[in-house]
Image (cartoon, rainbow, N blue to C red):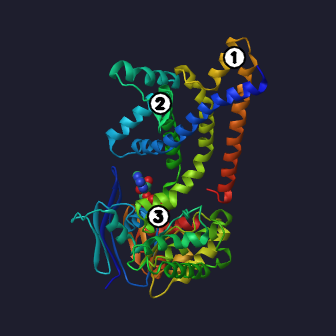
């Protein structure tokens, strides 16, 4: 097996990881905000339902959640995942994987948002209030930028964890990079398995640089 | 007619009565100094006036218009409270500047947001914003910060930050400007510059309420002094009356303690 062939085949697998990564971020970032508002709601039942949900999602393994999304709809409700996405044919298991990842990551991200929002001193809201701002103006003009600055470091952490978690999709037979590499080991070739680490390292390295850049951009003020 | 009339204001936090029936009147252009020991309810009084707390009882009347009356449960909609708030301005002990904005933006932000509600905002947007910017510059110049318009709050000393906070409150042209211990978060050598700015604001057009522990300042600047104890006004009068001829034992004891420390 030549180096080029392996590189190309692993890259094909890593495209699946990248796809899960992008789609999860695109959906979990906004969904997380909705969950945050739920868990900070002044309506008690909404708040406690949301927090229980977050507790369950964060308190059980992502791998278990993948199995649940994979098997439960079919076994209990006879629902089949579609086999195409945006008109492009895909492995139906990709749907299951994405549902599990989005829900899981939205729960974690919602806690990052909540931590950021709650870390803003009360005085910032009160300053906005006595200056006659509306609640919306206070949130968008006063608080939001400060929250963004504060959540960039934990968000960077979470997103880098996501890169590596994408390989968990293999447990429901999504043919991501580790799945491909493991097929080589069945043929007695072991080095591609270790070679996959390079893909993750490079990708996470780029993300680290990106987050470092954003942090630096936001460093023009303190507080 | 008095510009501000406060009647029988009461406020509880849980079981603790913090304000037990505070009432006073203030004429336009007067400076009221509120003194009193820690925990006597001075901050709570200012917070009630600025609608950051809702009193349990009492009335707040500005220019003859009843802004708050505990008997008639007026609607507490965001819009209405916002309108009422604009009669007052509040300068906090801890400044509470917006860290992500320059000084200029700190001062002009609220005015710009308010201007959006004007009917002619869309047509004259650029002109309106230019005027707001110019007047923000002017106000910052008044508090001695015209050379720092583009600085961020973290780059300033505490005294400078508090002067920006004063400018920010002034920008909305409140009828009654309140200060909650504006200098107690500052190093002693910085209090002078802030007090000087506040003194300079005194005019026949501007009514001010200053909660302070700076007795010299209160004596020199205030037209009227209130000494608060345990949620009540213990003594009230001109600066000379309260400082030189206090009637109440508690007031006397307070000054004796104050001189010792
Ligand atoms: N949000 C609150 N919840 C409960 N108790 C409060 C609250 N705000 C103030 N208090 C209590 O009310 C009392 C009066 O507080 P306040 O801050 O008005 O006093 P103060 O005269 O401003 O004191 P200081 O000189 O220390 O600033 C204090 O005993 C305080 O603990
Ligand atoms: Mg106080």
Please identify the quarter of the rendering in which residue B72 is found. Answer: bottom left
- Residues indicated by labels 1 and 3 sit on the same polypeptide chain: yes
Classify the position of the N terminus of chain B by image quarter: bottom left
Q: In this rendering, is residue A136 above or below B128?
A: above
Mark 2 or mark 1, earlier in chain:
2
Q: In this rendering, is residue B48 above or below B66?
A: above
Residue B130 percent location from the top left of the image: 54, 80
**Residues under labels 2 and 3: Cα distance?**
44 Å
| Residue furthest left in the image | B72
Residue B162 percent location from the top left of the image: 58, 69
**Residues under labels 1 and 3: Cα distance?**
61 Å
| Left or right of B50 on screen, residue A142 | right
Task: Quickly name the residue at label 3.
Answer: A128
Task: Quickly name the residue at label 2.
Answer: A95
Q: What's the residue at 35%, 71% (across, down)?
A: B83
Task: Quickly name the residue at label 1.
Answer: A184
* SS class, disc 1: helix
* Mark 3 chain: A
Q: What's the residue at 54%, 66% (across, down)?
A: B258
Residue B211 percent location from the top left of the image: 48, 69
């Amino acid at each position: 097996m030549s180096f080029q062939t392996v590189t190309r085949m692993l890259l094909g697998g890593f495209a699946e990881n990248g796809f899960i990564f992008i789609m999860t971020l695109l959906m979990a970032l906004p969904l997380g905000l909705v969950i945050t508002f739920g868990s900070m709601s002044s309506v008690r039942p909404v708040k406690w339902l949301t927090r229980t949900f977050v507790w369950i999602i964060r308190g059980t393994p992502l791998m278990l959640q993948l199995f649940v999304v994979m098997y439960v709809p079919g076994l209990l409700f006879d629902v089949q995942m579609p086999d195409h996405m945006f008109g492009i044919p895909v492995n139906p298991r990709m749907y299951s994987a994405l549902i599990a990842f989005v829900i899981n990551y939205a729960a974690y991200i919602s806690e990052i948002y909540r931590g950021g929002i709650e870390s803003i001193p009360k005085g910032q809201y009160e300053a906005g209030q006595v200056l006659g701002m509306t609640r919306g103006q206070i949130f968008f003009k006063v608080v939001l930028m400060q929250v963004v600055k504060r959540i960039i470091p934990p968000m960077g952490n979470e997103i880098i964890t996501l890169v590596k978690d994408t390989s968990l999709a293999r447990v429901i037979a999504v043919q991501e990079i580790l799945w491909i590499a493991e097929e080589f080991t069945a043929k007695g070739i072991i080095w591609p398995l270790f070679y996959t680490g390079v893909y993750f390292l490079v990708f996470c390295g780029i993300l680290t640089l990106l987050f470092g850049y954003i942090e630096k951009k936001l460093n023009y003020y303190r507080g | 007619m008095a510009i501000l009339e406060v009647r029988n204001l009461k406020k509880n936090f849980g079981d603790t009565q913090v304000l037990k029936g505070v009432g006073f009147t203030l004429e336009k252009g007067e400076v009221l100094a509120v003194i009193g020991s820690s925990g006597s309810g001075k901050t709570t009084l200012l917070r009630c006036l600025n609608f950051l707390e809702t009193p349990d009882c009492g009335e707040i009347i500005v220019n003859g218009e009843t802004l708050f009356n505990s008997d008639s449960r007026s609607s507490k909609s965001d819009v209405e409270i916002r309108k009422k708030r604009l009669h007052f301005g509040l300068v906090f002990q801890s400044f509470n500047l917006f860290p992500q904005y320059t000084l200029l933006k700190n001062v002009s932000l609220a005015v710009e947001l308010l201007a959006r509600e004007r009917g002619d905002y869309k047509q004259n947007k650029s002109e309106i914003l230019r005027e707001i910017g110019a007047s923000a510059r002017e106000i910052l110049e008044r508090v001695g910060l015209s050379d720092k318009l583009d600085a961020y709050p973290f780059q300033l000393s505490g005294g400078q930050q508090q002067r920006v906070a004063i400018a920010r409150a002034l920008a909305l042209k409140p009828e009654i400007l309140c200060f909650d211990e504006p200098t107690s978060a500052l190093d002693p050598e910085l209090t002078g510059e802030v007090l000087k700015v506040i003194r300079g604001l005194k005019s026949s057009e501007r009514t001010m309420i200053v909660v302070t522990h700076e007795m010299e300042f209160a004596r020199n600047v205030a037209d009227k002094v209130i000494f608060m104890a345990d949620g009540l006004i213990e003594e009230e009068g001109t600066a000379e009356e309260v400082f030189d001829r206090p009637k109440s034992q508690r007031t006397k004891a307070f000054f004796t303690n104050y001189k010792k420390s």
